[in-house]
Amino acid sequence: MSECPYRDPFKKKRSEGPVLETEFDNDPVAMILGLKDVRKAARNHETFSSNAPFRVPIPREEKLRSVRQFPIESDPPEHTEYRKIVEPIFNRPNQPDYQQRITEIIEAVVIPCMETNSFDAIHDFALPLQSRALALLLNVPEEESELWIKWGVHVLREGDGSSKGREMENYCKTAFRKSSEWGDDNLFSILNDASFQGRSLTDDEKLGFANLAFAGGRDTVINTLCIILAHFAENNQDLVRLGKEPELINFAGEEFIRFATPLTHIGRKCPVDSNVHGVLVKANQLISLNWASANFDDTVFQNPEQIKIERKPNPHIAFGNGPHNCLGAPHARLLMRNFIRVLTQKISNISLLSFESKTEKTKDYQRMNGYERLELCFSAK
Amino acid sequence: MAKVTYITPSGEEVAVDGAIGNLMEIAREHDIEGIEGACSGCCSCATCHIRVKPEWLDKTGRATEAEQDLIDLESDTDERSRLSCQVEMSEKLDGLIVEVAPF
């Protein structure tokens, strides 16, 4: 793992206590670190609320989007009703024909890369794969994804962020108007036709759903795909083993998702003054659920900094936990598993030609969670 | 052919005849309320938590060590708790009754 893109930056902080008192946006944030504590807090929406528009992501996003995201920035029971509206879309990966289509989309990206001496794993591979797979999930024509690819790796934080965010919101407004051309069972049509508490959704609510659908599973999926590719490039034995033991592919998928934990943390607001493991959090201030720290908690995971493709149990919370667990998780899991399967079937070796790690830098930690650049070469079987 | 009955969190009893596979897969095929099986049997999610009726525990067996590690992270568990993905249906379990735990 000499080139491993990730070292656990929270290891020492976890040994010092359950909470890291840090700050974002010039406000204090009590960051919960241990797996059991994070799980428990994630399920306690009364003490740790998601009813905090623009503040569930940390840093806050007022400047990056014009609308509150749904269903994530709401609490039960409203959250439950909001979430049910889009469940038919996000449960599509359970359909057998969907699983076949995902494999075809993956192969259509892998095969051209097999025919070159080098490829850019982010822009030639992971970004188009994520976008085309998203078109399948949202049940819109795949051609739509060609525009989404141009929005870059992180639609809200690419460059200064705001311009891409506006472009994406304008695209969504157009998509709501023309969605009936794509049928009545795509994300946009479903939101147009939805009922919430006996009324139609407002334009801002619809846009808030669409905003999350585009922003939520974008850089996260891309970073995870790249981390898997880089791991196989440095650990060919794991690629070979998964080819011989395909029954391990699901376990490997979980392990890569744990190891990558592409979303480091997420915010919750304390509605009233709260004592969080001995730290006073004043009303309206934030705590953070640190998924990345939790997934490397060595009181739960043996040798957490090692990728063990056969790890079981693997109680990671990379998709969150509790009522807000990631709506896109079935899609992401299927994508990762079928991606690994296609690699084991078509590729004998991956060469790492050059790379530059991506680092998330904050006041109290630096975390490598993907790549700025990753140049690879596939050797076909 | 083996039969299994799920008692859902809302109290409904759903019987499945000719049940083949593990109890999570069977539940998903029959849309049993409360069984999600998000990780497809990798012992990652615990979204397929069930409680076995006490009289059946000898035949199903108790949770394995890996399974128990995950169950220990959940609230509202007891010695009858199992992950349904880890219980393989068989003729010896014909008539089995399990309660689906609320998630």
Image: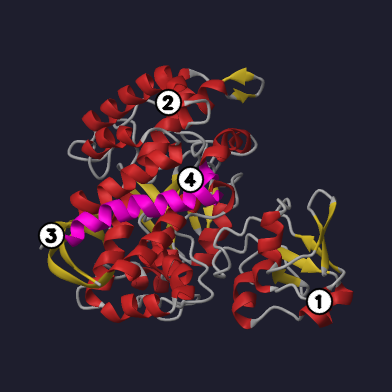
Residue bearing the label numbered 1: B91
Disc 3 and disc 2: Cα gap in Å? Answer: 40 Å
Tag 3: amino acid: Thr
* Whether residue A238 is situated above or below residue A167 in the rendered picture: below
Asked if residue A276 lies left or right of residue A232, the reply is right
**Position of residue A288 measured from the top left corner of the image (x, y, whole percent):** 43, 52
Q: Report the Cα–Cα distance between label 1 and label 2.
A: 52 Å
Residue hosting label 2: A207
Q: CA distance from mark 1 to mark 3?
A: 54 Å
Answer yes or no: are tags 1 and 2 on the same subunit.
no
Q: Name the chain letter of the residue that bears numbered label 4.
A: A
Chain bearing mark 3: A
Q: Tell me the amino acid under the disc marked 4.
A: Arg
Residue located 27% across and 68% down the image? A6
Disc 4 from disc 2: Cα separation = 22 Å
Q: Tell us which disc is closer to us: 4 or 2.
A: 2
Circle 3: element type: loop
Residue A318 visible (yes or no): yes
Closer mark to the observer between disc 3 and disc 4:
3
Residue B53 location, x and y as percent? 85, 70
Tell me the distance, in whole angstroms, between the alpha carbons under discs 4 and 1. 48 Å
Describe the element under mark 2 as helix, strand or loop: helix
Number of callouts in the render? 4
- Chain letter behind tag 1: B
Choose top left, top right, bottom left or bottom right for residue B78: bottom right
Q: Are marks 3 and 2 in contact (CB under 8 Å)?
A: no
Give the alpha-carbon distance from disc 3 to disc 4, as whole Å: 46 Å
